[in-house]
Image (spheres, rainbow, N blue to C red):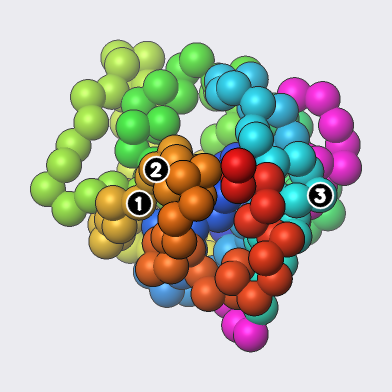
Amino acid sequence: MSARPLAIFGGTFDPVHLGHLSVAWEASELLDADVCLMPANVSPLKTPPIANAAQRVAMLRAALQKQSRLSLDTRELERGGPSYTIDTLTELRAEQGSRPLVLLIGADAFAGLTSWHRWRELFDVAHVGVLNRPGVEATLPEALERELAARRVDDATSLHTLPAGRVIELAVTPLEISATRVRELLGEGRDPRYLLPCGLFDDPAVLAPYRR
């Protein structure tokens, strides 16, 4: 039985920019999937964001208006505490039943997957879509390579018939936009007009956390 997958694209989104949205949109097309952007509350691997939870949600809502392919899921912000991906995917699996779930993750982050909390269990509850730059391959640790040996697939439609357990590489078009650089520009009083979605400029208060 085939079902339209739900893909999860997590991040700090501090702030959300066109690089995030472009990759999420392209992955949605490649997988024929719905994609939810999921802002992290406290990432165990990153420093705390400048914008608070409510401010980041406001930015995402502004960025995602007037389209239906990408949506927002705020469960990690509402849960509080460290944002462990396995907890989120387990919760989603309980809600979605046998619907295919796809965790979207950048190639560099995927190479470090063995450092994640209960990383092997991720494959029990979701597929993994590795967001790759064309022509660039990351070196994977041996433990991860062994885990992937029987999980790799090339055909995105195969993810529609199973709820979890497969890994597919998705060649996406990278936009070289850095959230750090966007924050620097805003802090200098400049206007990163074509680095951010236009919805973020409709209300001056949305970008206020980064202004000095």
180, above or below 176, in the image? above
User: Is residue 99 visible to us here?
Assistant: no
- For marks 1 and 3, give the CA distance: 23 Å
What is the CA distance from the residue labelled 3 to the residue labelled 2? Answer: 22 Å
The x, y position of residue 7, in whole percent, is: 57, 58
Kindly identify the amino acid type of the residue bearing the numbered disc 1: Ile
Residue ID at (87%, 42%):
78
Magenta residue span:
66-82
List x then y, in percent, for residue 38: 67, 50
The location of residue 46, given as percent across then percent down, is 56, 23
Could you tell me which residue is drawn at 34 percent across and 32 percent down? 108
**Given the image, on which type of amino acid does mark 3 rest?**
Ala
Secondary structure of the residue carrying tag 1 is loop
- Residue beneath label 3, please? 54
127 and 187: which is toward the camera = 187
Residue underneath mark 1: 177
- Contact? badges 2 and 1 (CB < 8 Å): yes
The reply to whether residue 108 is in sight is: yes
* Rendered view: 83 above or below 155: above
Residue positioned 44% across, 55% down in the render: 190
- Label 3 residue SS: helix
